[in-house]
Image (tube, coloured by chain):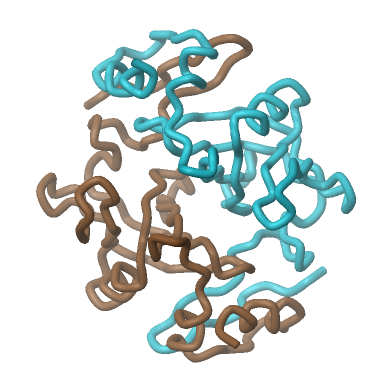
Chain colours: A cyan, B brown
Amino acid sequence: MGTEIYRSLEAAAIGEVLELNQALDGLKFDADGLLPAIAQDAVSGEVLMLAWMNRGAIERTLAEGFACYWSRSRASYWRKGESSGHLQALTEMRIDCDGDAILLKVEQSGPACHTNRPNCFYLSVETDQVRVISEPR
Amino acid sequence: MGTEIYRSLEAAAIGEVLELNQALDGLKFDADGLLPAIAQDAVSGEVLMLAWMNRGAIERTLAEGFACYWSRSRASYWRKGESSGHLQALTEMRIDCDGDAILLKVEQSGPACHTNRPNCFYLSVETDQVRVISEPR
């Protein structure tokens, strides 16, 4: 069943609902139990960063109202901003059509990127080079 | 070297450049040779979908000017819209601070989602349920 739940919603009308637990049970986590999660500024629409969530990170984010990811390098939960203070207050969480990606709309405090830039996507690809387009604060 | 290139740019000023091949050589592909790629509507800022790219998909996208992904289910290149006509014309490609995620700004023809919705993130998480928030065209 589980992952079939997303297929069953393909033709669903606006307003149809599914129990949260059923939706979470159906998520297609990878071999490490993770899904990619996109953080988007709820106001500007700017894509801030991409990180990873396991089921626990999703549940913590929903329970606490602030983005919590899974740090692959540290192999532990990563409450975004817990050391820097650059928290992401959750405005809305979305799940995609296949149940294999998460979108977080957030209110970002301070810079989202560990380099102190407003977002992580500061390298723009040009014809035969890549250009830095924002600076650390 | 390779992946060190992204660390070396952390403090870089606006306008610093890197050769494209050097940037691509430094990308941190996963064990399957893939990176998550976010497609964002270049005009509205709407996050349309998340898909996967290997180096070949990145190079094809840059050469052709339309998004080309790697289909994990079909294990082949997936020129977005090649069967549906729902192409994504590339406006800009960005690489993130760690060299492990891609952002594509695109002009989307037709619906981005295979369910014929404008974007794939049509399931909104509420307190204890998930709600369908857009309908197939």
Residue A73 location, quadrant: bottom right
Q: Nearer the viewer, residue A110 or A76?
A: A76
Q: How many marks?
A: 0
Indicate the quadrant containing the N terminus of chain B: top left, top right, bottom left or bottom right: bottom right
Residue A117 location, quadrant: bottom right
Give the farthest residue toward the left.
B83
Residue A97 location, quadrant: top left
Q: Residue at x 18, y 51 (%)?
A: B81
Q: Residue at x 31, y 18 (%)?
A: A9
The x and y percentages for residue B119 are 36, 37
Q: Residue at x 36, y 61 (%)?
A: B53
Q: Is residue B79 something that shows in the picture?
A: no
Q: Residue at x 70, y 29 (%)?
A: A61
Q: Is residue A130 left or right of residue A67?
A: left
Is A129 situated above or below A66? Answer: below
Q: Is residue B56 left or right of residue A22?
A: left
The x and y percentages for residue B113 are 29, 37
Indicate the quadrant containing the C terminus of chain B: top left, top right, bottom left or bottom right: top left
Is B56 situated above or below A59? Answer: below
The x and y percentages for residue A78 are 76, 44
Q: Nearer the viewer, residue B64 or A67?
A: A67
Q: Is residue A50 something that shows in the picture?
A: yes
The x and y percentages for residue B15 are 62, 86
